[in-house]
Amino acid sequence: MRPTISYTQKLQEPRINQRISARTLRIIGPKGENLGVLTLEEALKKSEALGLDLIEISPNAIPPVAKIADFGKYLYEENKKNKLTKKSHSVEVKTVQVKLGTGDHDLMLKAKKTSEWLSEGNRVKVDLFLPGRAKYLDDKFLRERIDRMLKFVSVDYKIADSAKKSPKGMTVIIERA
């Protein structure tokens, strides 16, 4: 019934069943109800009667808190929670597309939008779109075209990923300084 646990997993996962060292525990039932403070033996008997595991949730509390639940399901839910918290801190990458012949007024409008995104904390990918044979133009000339647009950006920024050739043409990624 108990899964085997390697040394590296032991450090990250909570203690279960006989691995719990505390003599008394505050027990939470399988439906989230408080079962009170029980001895380790009583708690293990209760969890075995229900066919579930005793999982130590908060070992530093006095007395430590344990929950009666299915260990596999518990791990699945914890991993799911961790993934959600990691995603919420991610930075969005917005994209602005510029062409070789884009006029100054249009560049100013695109730079204004870029400035808004940078001030919100997003990264901005500036794509210089190059159709057909334009992809084979000199890199220095193409970088000057991207710099022409970046001159209009009103927010302080730094280049996170320098100008590189991409399938569409040339790409540079900027972020707030």
Image (spheres, helix red, strand yellow):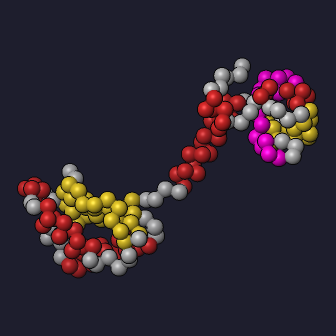
Horizontal side of residue 152 vs 86, given as left or right:
left
Looking at the image, can residue 21 be seen? Answer: yes
State the image coordinates of residue 156 (x, y, percent, origin top left): 38, 76
State the image coordinates of residue 43 (x, y, percent, origin top left): 87, 30
Looking at the image, can residue 69 be seen? Answer: no
Q: State the residue lying farthest toward the left.
A: 133
Q: Which residues are magenta?
A: 45-61
Horizontal side of residue 65 vs 160, given as left or right:
right
Is residue 93 inside the magenta stretch? no
Horizontal side of residue 163 vs 65, given as left or right:
left
State the image coordinates of residue 45 (x, y, percent, origin top left): 88, 24
Q: State the residue lying farthest toward the top.
A: 1
Q: Quadrant of residue 35?
A: top right
- Counting labels gives 0
Q: Give above or below for 62 relative to 29.
A: below
Q: Give above or below for 72 relative to 28.
A: above
At horizontal 21% and vertical 74% (from top left) the residue drawn is: 148
Nearer to me, 112 or 147: 147
Task: Name the quadrant of the C terminus.
Answer: bottom left
Task: Name the quadrant of the N terminus.
Answer: top right
Horizontal side of residue 121 vs 26, given as left or right:
left
Q: Give above or below for 69 relative to 91.
A: above
At horizontal 65% and vertical 38% (from top left) the residue drawn is: 12
Q: State the residue lying farthest toward the front.
A: 7
Is residue 48 inside the magenta stretch? yes
Nearer to me, 104 or 27: 27
Q: Give above or below for 104 relative to 138.
A: below
At horizontal 71% and vertical 22% (from top left) the residue drawn is: 2
At horizontal 18% and vertical 76% (from top left) the residue drawn is: 103
